[in-house]
Image (cartoon, rainbow, N blue to C red):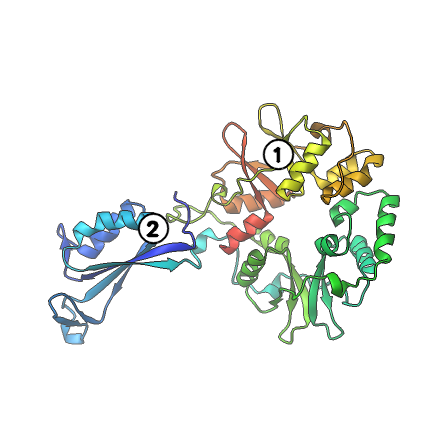
Amino acid sequence: MKQRLKENAQLMTIYIGEADRWRSKPLYAAILETLKLEKIAGATVVRGVAGFGAHSNIHTAAILRLSEDLPLLIQIVDTPQEIDRAIEIISPMVREGLITVQDVKVVKYTHRYLNPLPGDRLVQEVMTRKVETLTPRMGVGEAWRKMLATLIKAMPVVDEHDQVAGMLTDEDLLERAGLNQRLSVAERLDGALLKEETDRLEGSQLTVGDVMSQPAITVRAKDSLGLAAERMARAGVKRLPVVDEEGRLVGVLSRVDILRLAAEKDSKPQNAPVGAAVRVREVMSASLPAVGEDAGLAEIVEVMLEGGAHRVVVLDSKGKAAGLISDSDLVARVQPSARGGLLRSLRGLGKTPDSEVKAGELMSPGVLMADPETPISEAVRMMFEEKRKWLVVAGPDGKPLGLVDRQILLRALADR
């Protein structure tokens, strides 16, 4: 199956007459059959109501003249390479007519039965209504304590009228308030390190309004789930505040809420049209942060930082995926004396603490893997059943080829 249409494509338009023939068949039908056999992405035939061509004869679709030679337009959208190939094949068939080509921008290309997302459902049917919030004037230390207590990584920031002013995430605190770890890492810290970090934040003069992400990307309660998924995928965020018609906060929609619905819906992409992304190999990331089982702590951290990832795949001696290591795994499993330096290293500061610990000892064994031909909808279901955030795409030899995570799946479902 071909790669799906990219943003930059070409439109070929063929102008012919309804009476034109090719090998005893109507020319338009012969052209469609030929394009389908050649696996061109798709074509559409449009019948005109009136027109004239090379011989200047006017043809109309008036009631008494329905048998006249009316103009037909055949339109094909595909990659420039495929359009060039189509021109070569079709040109000899068009003995009288016109063929034009122009550049077009593909905004969306999808098929309803390939998309397991019930995009017509309303956001208010799926959203979480009980929402933890922050205020712009709240100190960053108080906000961090609330995140730790609720284990929520992102919270809407609302003003006195319940209008959404922004979003505060643990990443905002990392980048703008000098926090030394993300929430998932903080959950694994011992009491002394966690208290030290929290006390330091509480001594800061910064407020939530100073460090929050703004303006907030929101969605309305009565918007469609399809619109929300596309907005979330485009912005690369995990949560959207949900507002009513007056802009007041009424809930939160998460990426997990959307993917869970897709996992529950049965979608079998059989007889898929050419050009549509159906399999994980078509959407997976070929960038695979990985280390060997004998890699030391310094190498593991370096791979994480270089790839901007919070996890790495551990490969065995045969190059097969043996386990995963997350940043929180590192913090939980290294010696307490090494944790302070490790936290600084995970932020890209200082040097990794010396340690003899190896990747094979730090990793969580067992990796969720799938064949490259696995349908996207099946990948969503697998990840939810196994409660995994990552899925490793592996070849027949068991060696990793790529990676699929929740963000990649959301983009695929939203057809980004």
Q: Residue 308 has which mark?
A: none
Q: Which residue is mark 1?
A: 290
Position of 344 with respect to 243 (left or right) is right
Q: Nearer the viewer, residue 382 or 88?
A: 88
Q: Which residue is mark 2?
A: 80
Q: How far across and how far down the image is residue 126, in percent?
A: 62, 61
Instruction: For the residues labelled 1 and 2, say whether their Cβ atoms are less than 8 Å apart.
Output: no
- Image location (x, y in percent) of residue 379: 55, 43
33 left or right of 267 in image: left
Question: How many marks overall?
Answer: 2
Most distant residue in the front direction: 350
Q: Looking at the picture, which amino acid does disc 2 mark?
A: Pro
Q: Is residue 413 positioned above or below 139 on the image?
A: above
Badge 2: few (under 14), some or many (20 or more) residues near its Cα, within 10 Å? some
**Residue 209 appears left or right of 62:** right
Q: Residue furthest top?
A: 317
Is 281 on the left or on the right of 72, as rendered? right
Q: In the image, what residue occupies the spot 18% across and 75% down?
A: 62
Visible residue check, residue 363? no
Residue at 44% x, 53% y is: 113
Residue flagged by tag 1: what amino acid is it? Ala
Q: Secondary structure at mark 2?
A: helix
- Asked where in the image residue 112 lies, by quadrant, the reply is bottom left
Q: Can you give x and y, in whole percent of width and height, for residue 407 in the image?
A: 58, 50
Residue 83 shows up from this direction:
yes
Residue appearing at x 80%, y 62% in the figure: 206
- Which of the two labelled residues, at mark 1 and mark 2, occupies the earlier sequence position? 2
Tell me the CA gap for discs 1 and 2. Answer: 36 Å
Q: Residues within 10 Å of mark 1 (few under 14, many from 20)?
A: many
- Residue 235 lies, in percent from the top left, at 58, 58
Q: Nearer the viewer, residue 353 or 91?
A: 353
